[in-house]
Amino acid sequence: MEKNQKIILQSDENCPVRKSLIILSGKWRLLIVFQINERVIRYGELKRAIPGISEKMLIQELNFLVEHKFVTKKSFPEIPPRVEYSLTKLGLDTFPIIDKLAAFGLENL
Amino acid sequence: MEKNQKIILQSDENCPVRKSLIILSGKWRLLIVFQINERVIRYGELKRAIPGISEKMLIQELNFLVEHKFVTKKSFPEIPPRVEYSLTKLGLDTFPIIDKLAAFGLENL
DNA sequence: TTAGGTACTTACTAAATGGTTAGAAACACT
DNA sequence: AGTGTTTCTAACCATTTAGTAAGTACCTAA
């Protein structure tokens, strides 16, 4: 805690909080990660599991998460196409954050 | 965890993660909260403590945080003016989130 | 009289984010 | 021939968020 605070005191790009925010902020990212959870899930399933998300945002954020190694993507050469998404270890490592966010929301909002 | 997940499965406005994100997302909010920390701090001090933030964003986000009861503001009728900010209990309660964000950033980014 | 300090406020601009709609590809089924 | 399925892609627009720069008010000290 004291260590983190010291780093925050020079809150520039080296600040780990800021680094996390740059990658994990946004309306859908953490929600998608948490929704995938420990499953292997198809694009369409995910879409149905996150009401309100547009196809554009879902695919865009999935691509981002794949690029940044939070999510693994596996395409099957079938017709109609099948694509499966699952979390990497990095993706699973965001769960403590999501848990705290959920706990805070439940208690205070 | 299972409970949270269940709630997430209908990820609408009732989702506590989403509620938290609506209030706490943004480039500066959590940074400001963590920077105030347990101190009583003046506007100018805070500005110097958060390099890169513009006056507009600082005051705008401070106002938001005051409105939403994360921060307390106390103005002294002096010249030059003096205004002191400090965290409420609600503000302090966001620390678990910030800690996890920092931990994640340190370990992974 | 001028410059300086503090805490803002305003106007304007730029960039990032999100939403809507349409469509493409490729095959199966009717 | 036409419809449906699934996973995307692209164009366009609206909204939100953030940055820049200038200015305000009031008093103090040089």
Image (cartoon, coloured by chain):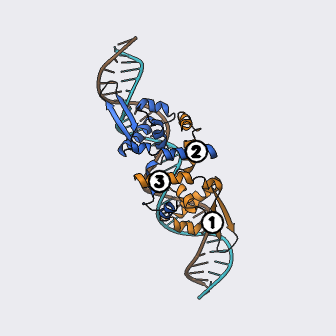
Chain colours: A orange, B blue, C cyan, D brown
Q: CA distance from mark 2 to mark 1?
A: 27 Å
Question: What percent of the width, then of the height, locates residue C12?
Answer: 42, 41
Question: What percent of the width, then of the height, locates residue B32?
Answer: 46, 39
> Under tag 1, what secondary structure?
loop
Q: Which mark is residue A40?
A: 1
Q: Residues within 10 Å of mark 3 (few under 14, many from 20)?
A: many
Amino acid type shown at disc 2: Ala
Q: Which mark is residue B103?
A: 2
Query: Seen in the image, is B81 located left or right of residue A83?
Result: left
Work out whether D23 lies above or below A70: above
Q: Chain of mark 3?
A: A
Q: Which mark is residue A81?
A: none
Q: Is residue B109 visible?
A: no
> Under tag 3, what secondary structure?
helix
Q: Quadrant of the C terminus of chain B?
A: top right
Work out whether C30 lies above or below A39: below
Amino acid type shown at disc 1: Val
